Image (cartoon, rainbow, N blue to C red):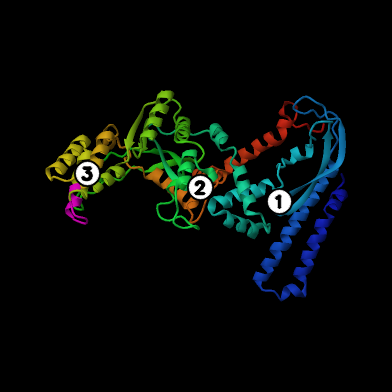
Amino acid sequence: MSISSTNDAFSASRSRFEQVCCFMGGEAASNLTHWELETKLSVDVRELVRQLYQDHLDLRSSREERLVDVIDAEGDRHTSVEADHTRSLQTIFGEVSVTRLAYRRRGKNNLYLGDATLNLPEELHSHGLRELSAIESARGSFEEATEAIRRVTGIGCAKRQVELLAARSVVDFEAFYENVTRVQGNLGEVLVLSADGKGIVMRPDALRPATAKAAGRATVKLKTRLSRGEKHNRKRMAEVGAVYDVTPVVRTPGDIIGRETDAERAPAPKAANKWLTASVVDNAASVISAVFDEAQRRDPEHRRTWIALVDGAKHQIDCINAEAKTRGVRVSIVCDFIHVLEYLWSSAWSFFPEGDSAAEAWVAEKALSVLQGQASTVAASIRRKATCLGLDPRSRENADRCANYLLAKRDYLNYRQALEEGWPIASGVIEGACRHLVKDRLDLTGARWGLNGAEAILKLRALRSNGDFDEYWRFHLDRERHRVHEARFAHGTIPLAA
């Protein structure tokens, strides 16, 4: 095609550009404020670019060559060709139409080489709008995402459409991390695995069967909202996992529980290269398996020290032990020390009046003993104190609960070794992950989540937290090309003109 023919293909765009130039050079524009000029240009330029997009698509259509031999995935030849098949595409600049050749065969779906070359989506909305929906939905509510898209593009997408586009954008999340490569960490660094859960208020149809049954039996005080305590049977647990590297920092119990007069304390080990994942669809075992997959990518030969930081939940510990056994890797499990402190403080109020400063010294003494590896001794002393004081069952309830916890988890309270090895003993990373991935976005006032919408947001926020979104998006578009187009042709290959 000659240069003049190419120029003619963009005549509508040139005409539109001239209109913008004429307006900007005219008297009407001279009377506008800079804000009014910005507003006017934002609309005019979007329309100009949309026209450029349309002219380019029309030019591609006019250049499309008819191929003789187009074979589908089942080995059938599509020998009948029809021109001028048109479909719409809603882009970030506005709606355009795509005209292309249709390769037909009776009883079979048409094949469109033009669609495959452009990697067009199955739905109306472009990959650019899908990406924008994913980014904005991960930041704020779907209503806010809808408004942000309208503000940036001038396009009015329905809230439900934005939610569907966000859900479509994360379909390759698991496949992406199965194929991603990791730089091997320093052998001296500790590999830390952690998992926890956070409830999300769900729509009734998205609850797990047992929770839905309990919710159906429950009564509510108000018709239009849930009162305090009534969300318990309205939630579904989002399982959150984390993997990160830590350079060991040797510490003593005094570095953890010290006095203001003590010498300067050693700093806590700092997390590096954090990787997060979360799911409201998969159970804890599946998420912990994904956590082990990431750890395996970082240390495939199991040459580093692996530790798992948990809050003490039995099912999590069981899942970690099962995964470690299956993979043949040694994992040292450490219960979060902050949880131990919470139990100790709770037990203190069995012995001291609320607000008594003596409780603080007592908790510090017991905490130091636990850090020194004496959890069983501390549990026995708490029970003995409750008995010596003659406390009734109700008064000693918290003391017994603390003692039971220390005894049940004593195998995972080896803080003496952890501090000597320089390991972290607090699960701040996974607590922060639960807050960032779940609470900050999915715990909005009045929000009731569907399963697909909640799952999409968790995965999008994880991708962004991991710094993997851009790489993931390229991977996702490649997978889309294969799913939507390449898989329909023989040998998974899109035919090209000679």
Query: Which of the numbered marks, if any, corresponds to residue 91?
Result: 1
Query: Which of the numbered marks, if any, corresponds to residue 148?
Result: none
Residue 311, above or below 129: above
How many C-alpha atoms fall within 10 Å of the one at disc 2: few (<14), some, or many (≥20)?
Answer: many
Residue 436 locus on image (x, y percent): 45, 49
Residue occupying the point 40% across, 52% down: 229
Q: Is residue 252 visible?
A: no
Front residue of 169 and 345? 345
How many C-alpha atoms fall within 10 Å of the one at disc 1: few (<14), some, or many (≥20)?
Answer: some
Instruction: Find out whether residue 362 is within the magenta segment.
Output: yes
Q: What's the residue type where badge 1 is placed?
A: Thr
Position of the N terminus by quadrant: top right
Which range of residues does the magenta coloring cover? 352-363
Count of residue discs? 3
In primary-sequence order, the first of circles 3 and 2 is 2
Q: Nearer the viewer, mark 3 or mark 1?
A: 3
Residue 56 locus on image (x, y percent): 79, 49
Query: Which of the numbered marks, if any, corresponds to residue 202?
Result: 2
Query: Which of the numbered marks, if any, corresponds to residue 399?
Result: 3
Instruction: Find out whether residue 381 is within the magenta segment.
Output: no
Q: Nearer the viewer, mark 2 or mark 1?
A: 2
Q: What's the residue type where badge 2 is placed?
A: Met
Mark 2 secondary-structure assignment:
loop
Q: What's the residue type where badge 3 is placed?
A: Ala
Task: Answer with left or right where residue 187 lies relative to residue 2.
Answer: left
In primary-sequence order, the first of circles 3 and 1 is 1
For the residues bearing labels 2 and 1, Cβ distance under 8 angstroms: no
Position of the C terminus by quadrant: top right
Residue 316 locus on image (x, y percent): 39, 35
Q: Is residue 301 visible?
A: yes
Residue occupying the point 44% across, 48% down: 218
For the residues bearing labels 3 and 2, Cβ distance under 8 angstroms: no
